[in-house]
Every structure is written in C-alpha cells, then in structure tokens.
Amino acid sequence: MSSTRVGVLGATGAVGQRLIQLLDPHPEFEIATLTASDDSAGKSYREAAKWRIETPIPDDVAELVVERTDPDAVPDDVDLLFSSLPSSVGERVEPGFCEAGYVVSSNSSNARMADDVPLTIPEVNHDHLDLLEVQRDERGWDGALVKNPNCSTITMVPTLAALDSFGLSTVHVATMQAVSGAGYAGVSSMEILDNVLPHIGGEEEKMETETRKLLGSFDGAEIDLHDVDVAASCNRVPTLDGHLESAWAETSEALTADNAMAAMRDAPSLDLHSSPDQLIEVFEDPNRPQPRLDRMVGGGMSVAAGGVRETSDGVQYNCLAHNTLRGAAGASVLNGELLVEDGWF
Ligand SMILES: NC(=O)C1=CN([C@@H]2O[C@H](COP(=O)(O)OP(=O)(O)OC[C@H]3O[C@@H](n4cnc5c(N)ncnc54)[C@H](OP(=O)(O)O)[C@@H]3O)[C@@H](O)[C@H]2O)C=CC1
Ligand SMILES: N[C@@H](CC(=O)OP(=O)(O)O)C(=O)O
C-alpha cells in the first residue's frame, strides 16, 4: 500500500508528541511536515520539542524543521493533517487549512458541536463521517474537518453505545482524570499531590453535549442528537495517565449486569491499523479497571470496564481509557485511518 503524506499541526505539544510517536512507525502514513507556534518555527523538531514521551524521539523526525502553522508552509503533496493546537488557535486556523484543500483530523475542542462537522469515534458512529458531503457543499471546501471527542467523553461513550439497545435514557458520571489531560504545565505538583481538584473548566458541559452528538443519528443531511440526559461531575486526581469514570446508566428496558457485560464485550471493533481487537475489555473483578494496571489495554486503544452491578433502573459500572492515546492522539489517528479507507482525499 502506498503511504499518505501527513503533517502535524501543534507537533511540539503533549498531544503532538504522542501523534509523532504513533505516526512515525505507522505503515500507512509518512510524516512530511510539522508545525507549531512562531517561537518554534525555523528550529529543528529536536530543538523545538521538549520530548517527554517514554520512547526515544524518532531520529528522522527530530531533524525536520518546524514550520509556521500556516497553509502556505505546508507542501501541496500533503493530504492529511493531524491537529493538536490549543482550541483558540484551532478555531482561528483550521478552516484556512480546509479551504486550502487539506483534510484535517483534529483533536482540539473547537467546532466539535458544529452542525456540519463530524465528531467521530470510528467504532461508534462511522456513518457520521458522511456529514463531510454536507460540509463541503456548505463551505465550498476541497478539504474537510473531522473532530474526535474530549478524552473523558471518549472513555464513556463506547460503553453507552453498547447499552443503547436497551433504551438508554439517563447517564450520571463522575470522572477521576489524570494530570496529563491538563498538559505538561497544566496543574502544579503543589496543587495536585495529596489532593483532588473537584473542577475542570468546561469538561462537564463537553461530556454532556458531545455524548448526545456521538450517539445521535445521521439522516444524510443532519445529526439528530440522542435524547439521553447526561449529567457529569469532573475531577482531577493525582494519576499520570488514564481517566477512570464511575457511570450510572438508566435504560427504559430491563437490564441485568450480565446483559450489560455481554453487550459491552460484543461491541464491535474495526479492521483499522490502530483498532484494538477488543473495543471494550470487561473485567469481572470489581476492583478493576485501575489506571496504573489497565490504561494500556489494547495498546492504549481499548476501553476497560468493570464493577458492573444492577441498580433500580439500569446499571452502575466503572470505565477507563488512556487519555492521550484512545482519548487524544490515538483517536485522531484512528479517524485519519478511516478517512483514508473511506476515500475522503
Ligand atoms: N493533553 C491531553 O491529554 C489532551 C489535550 N487535548 C487538546 O489537544 C490540544 C493540544 O493539547 P496539548 O498538546 O496538551 O497542548 P500543548 O500546549 O502541550 O501544545 C500546544 C501546541 O500548539 C502549538 N501552538 C501554541 N500556540 C500556537 C499558535 N498561536 N500558533 C500555532 N501553534 C501554536 C504549540 O507550539 P509551541 O511549542 O511552539 O508553543 C504546541 O505545538 C488542545 O486543544 C487540548 O485541549 C485533548 C485531549 C487530551
Ligand atoms: N480537558 C481534558 C483534556 C482536554 O484537553 O480536553 P479537550 O480535548 O476537550 O480540550 C482533561 O483535562 O483531561
């Protein structure tokens, strides 16, 4: 198979580095260009990125010169761009790349809820990608913009999609989110050690709205949001990677713990390079999943679930995913693989 030439916007950041880690050995993608802020432009990637990933910085990528984040700085033979820019920057620059003909698989939160922007988890709502036809018609773009959801939303939604055949009506969720979700300089050690921070700005609203779009139905013209009622409480805890969440799901049809576990185990995966064999790993042991033990299930691309028990009108359970792999860089790469497979450029 010939490889697709790709670029990374915001390549020096925490998610950008994860993207490099995933893209460098990827059999379908060839890293052709990297961008960051004007402060980094003109420097080698080795110099501009303070590499903080556990695997070594790839030698070939380290020598690339970082470009400005501007469509004119990206070679014409690049088809696909992965974006991990701050959302305020993404909002300003991503449309320009799409207008210039690039397909952008973006991790940033801007435009996730826009009517003509697909917000996709490939295993959950692959069909929403066809919204790109509407997007191209409306915006006149040769390129396209696709988003992956917030990391806490991604952790929970595959389990909810599995339970939706029982008539999902209400979800309450409390998160225990790792510090890497706030980026390297996000929370100081004095704030988080021996502590829990009971607020993450904007996170609860993202979980409550993005979930309804992801579980919504697409009729060929627009997404009809799912009418599930979602209430979230988001908390930062002193783990490094892996968001753990306690969810209460209510359904209109009777749901036993066994049926819930079977539905989660049967949730289909896909045949994409980054898809895990098992989308949801279900533990019988109520003491699992745990961030340190289970964040790398399925190479960091599976969701882990456990502690499933019946409640008066549904089930309660815990779920976990690696927030910078399945929750961020891995999610963008998976969307990129789907864009290639479906022939969007
Ligand atoms: N950390 C995480 O786990 C998750 C993060 N996200 C989202 O992903 C995005 C990136 O997050 P993260 O990697 O943590 O952020 P970082 O701050 O670590 O990285 C930001 C990147 O954007 C570049 N950048 C900053 N300002 C500009 C600008 N004005 N013009 C061009 N490039 C710029 C930076 O370049 P330079 O080095 O030159 O400053 C850097 O490459 C955010 O939208 C975040 O909300 C989503 C899910 C999880
Ligand atoms: N807010 C998330 C990470 C993040 O950046 O989310 P978003 O992609 O929605 O901006 C966390 O703190 O764990």
Image (tube, helix red, strand yellow):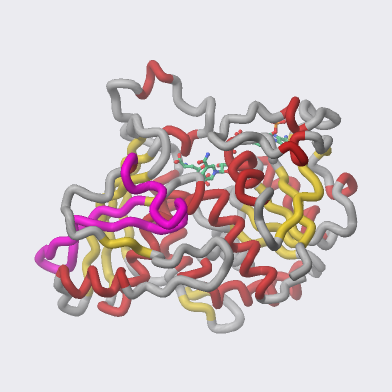
Position above or below: 20 against 262: above
Q: Residue at x 22, y 70 (%)?
A: 260
Q: Where's the N terminus, which quadrant?
A: bottom right
Question: What is the x, y in percent for residue 204?
Answer: 39, 47
Choose between 62 and 87: the one closer to the eye: 62
Position above or below: 255 against 303: below
Residue 21's image quarter? top right
Q: Residue at x 54, y 73 (%)?
A: 271
Judge from the rendering whether residue 260 lies leftward or rightward of residue 118; answer left or right. Answer: left
**Is residue 171 in the magenta section?**
no
Asked whether residue 233 appears in the rendered view, the answer is no
Q: Residue at x 40, y 71 (%)?
A: 226
Q: How many marks?
A: 0
Residue 172's image quarter? bottom left
Judge from the rendering whether residue 308 lies leftward or rightward of residue 93; answer left or right. Answer: left
Judge from the rendering whether residue 328 lies leftward or rightward of residue 258; answer left or right. Answer: right
Question: What is the x, y in percent for residue 94?
Answer: 73, 51
Q: Where's the C terminus, which quadrant?
A: bottom right
Furthest-bottom residue in this view:
219
Question: What is the x, y in percent for residue 111?
Answer: 61, 55
Q: Residue at x 45, y 71 (%)?
A: 269
Q: Which residues are magenta?
A: 292-320
Choose between 185 and 24: the one closer to the eye: 24
Question: What is the x, y in percent for residue 287?
Answer: 18, 48
Asked whether residue 85 appears in the rendered view, the answer is yes
Furthest-top residue in this view:
190
Residue 238's image quarter? top left
**Is residue 316 in the magenta section?**
yes
Q: Please tell me in which quarter of the rendered image ligand 1 is found.
A: top right
Furthest-left residue in this view:
312
